[in-house]
Amino acid sequence: MSTKLSKRAQTEILTIVESKGDVSPEDVLERARSPRSALHGLIEWDVRKAGLAYQLEQARDLIRQVRVIFYRDDLPPLDVRALLSVEADGRRVFKSVQAISEDGDLRRQVMQQMKLDVERLVAKYNTFKEFWPLLRATLRRKRKRSA
């Protein structure tokens, strides 16, 4: 449900940051109320549609919270998300990690998403000098727990 922001819309958000020092979703919504705002057309103003969209997002959040524990020979148990979002039969659905691991196409989708997630993580935090040492330390801790 992500929309590519125009330069004008980005500028409006950055103007809020410049005037207040930060920006919240409430600030953006208030600015977007004006029909003259570049943000106006990016918000769903039909309350019924917006309400359904919010309920669907709540349902997605509930699905993302479902966890399972994998027990592996001679390794500590692994607590993971039980369901991951994939494209199946032309729509977005959540499938079990096991079903994904057994289906080459679904597994490729998840690996592609994983690659994008890592690229976004790097793009978001790469400017902080602490990023790479923190990432290395986190990976070492994860490997120790898995070994």
Image: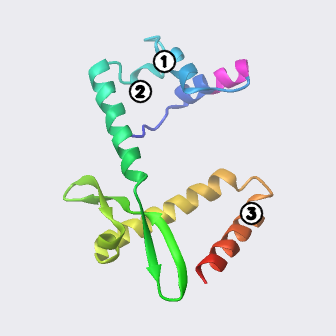
Q: Position of residue 7 (x, y in %)?
A: 55, 31
Relative to 62, is 120 above or below?
below
Please name the amino acid that badge 2 sits on.
Leu
Name the residue beneath numbered marker 3: 134
Please name the amino acid that badge 1 sits on.
Ala
Judge by depth and name the residue closer to the eye, 76 or 133.
76
Q: Which is nearer the N-term, disc 3 or disc 1? A: 1
In percent of the image, x 79 and y 58: which residue is there? 130
Which numbered disc covers residue 61? none
In percent of the image, x 48 and y 18: which residue is there? 32
Judge by depth and name the residue closer to the eye, 92 or 42.
92
Q: Quadrant of residue 28?
A: top right
Q: Which is nearer the N-term, disc 1 or disc 2? A: 1
Which numbered disc covers residue 42? 2
Magenta stretch contains residue 77: no
Residue that protrudes farthest toward the left in the picture: 89
Q: Are marks 1 and 2 in contact (CB under 8 Å)?
A: yes
Q: Characterize the magenta stretch by its predominant secondary structure.
A: helix
Name the residue beneath numbered marker 1: 32
Distance of label 2 from label 3 (alpha carbons): 36 Å
Check disc 3: other Cα within 10 Å, few if <14, some if 14-19, many if 20+: few
Q: Nearer the viewer, mark 3 or mark 1?
A: 3
Check disc 1: other Cα within 10 Å, few if <14, some if 14-19, many if 20+: many
Please name the amino acid that badge 3 sits on.
Leu
User: Magenta residues?
Assistant: 14-20
